[in-house]
Amino acid sequence: MSTLVDVDLAKSYRLLNHGPTVLVSSAHGNQRNVMAAAWAMPLDFSPPKVLVVVDKATHTRELMEASGEFVLNVPCRAQAEQVLKAGSVSGKEVDKFATCGLEAVAGDKVAAPHVAGCIAYLECRIISEPHNQQQYDLFIGEVVFARADPAVWHDGHWQFDGHDDKRSLHYIAGGNFFSIGEQFSVTADQTVD
Amino acid sequence: MSTLVDVDLAKSYRLLNHGPTVLVSSAHGNQRNVMAAAWAMPLDFSPPKVLVVVDKATHTRELMEASGEFVLNVPCRAQAEQVLKAGSVSGKEVDKFATCGLEAVAGDKVAAPHVAGCIAYLECRIISEPHNQQQYDLFIGEVVFARADPAVWHDGHWQFDGHDDKRSLHYIAGGNFFSIGEQFSVTADQTVD
């Protein structure tokens, strides 16, 4: 397993900018959990904020509301089966890390753990917005710490060439995923008529 | 250009579930505009809702707030230059559709136009949330109509094989994009201990 490197918080939005499916990890007291979420994205650059939708029926929701924290982990193609399982099983009665074949690693700036083998994680503190949480299951987090796998994160960008097993996952439905594809560049001609 | 087909509203979240970058189109009175946005995603299944972050400095924001409507368009690889331009130029002083080489098409259920050549569009009515709009530049829309390109949308799913020019775009930064990659399936063993 690669040792992750710190990500400049001002560039941490780029970990999610291309729309990957994430794993949300959380903890409170002696409980911990992990779930899959396709509905997460950046909200702001500085201070960096993220959005994630977490249903009221989930154990993760209880732990997030009790602790005021969560972690967004960016899983990769090598973890697709574990991610699907993390989106299919409830953690109310089992240790979902063990059930899904995922390893919890102690947090840096938050008590919530992150997930070993993921290509990045963003530690977040919830910005309390009770109306959004109740009405829309929508949580806002301020990113307080982030790390990424230097095999695929260089110079503040994802670069997956030569690392197909570490490409990010983009969930479709029914156990179907896309992995992220080819990178390419375009230039915009700014001297328009 | 393909003729788009109606998308069942209950499955319209799948147009955005894998995290594509979108074009936001809007209109009010005799003004119209289009901008690129990497920060858009589904919020709910039924009735279907979406989120999009739109900065206060944009002309799109003015038109959205005046009209109460917007359209999220899913552009494709063939349109990457136009998408980059739509994220680089302001529409306050130019007709940005013309500037970016994009064609506006009259809306179905909303007055806002959609963008020709995109692989899908979702027509949305804003659910007014003044605190989110002011504090976070965050807009919630209810999806009232959606269509997709049958070349790449079958049986309620994206299927891009054989259509690389129609793959969705996932913005990185600085004119760099990913196109969405390979599709694959996994199964979760539900009979866990």
Image: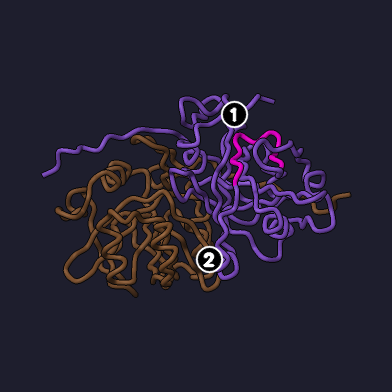
Chain colours: A brown, B purple
* Residue span colored magenta: B113-124
Residue at 56% x, 70% y is B135
Label 1: few (<14), some (14–19) or many (≥20) C-alpha neighbours in 10 Å: many
Q: Nearer the viewer, residue B37 or B109?
A: B109
SS type, badge 2: helix
Which residue type does callout 1 highlight?
Asp
Please provide percent x and percent y for residue B112: 70, 44
Determine if the magenta segment contains residue B118. Answer: yes
Q: Mark 1 near mark 2, Cβ–Cβ under 8 Å?
A: no
Residue identifier under label 2: A11
A25 to B34, vertically: above or below: below
Q: Quarter of the image holding residue B75?
A: top right
Q: Give the foreground label among 1 and 2.
A: 1
Q: Chain of mark 2?
A: A
> Quick one: SS at disc 1?
loop
Residue A112, image x, y percentages: 28, 68
Left or right position of B95 against A6: right
Depth check: B70 or A87 in front?
A: B70
Q: Residue at x 84, y 53 (%)?
A: B94
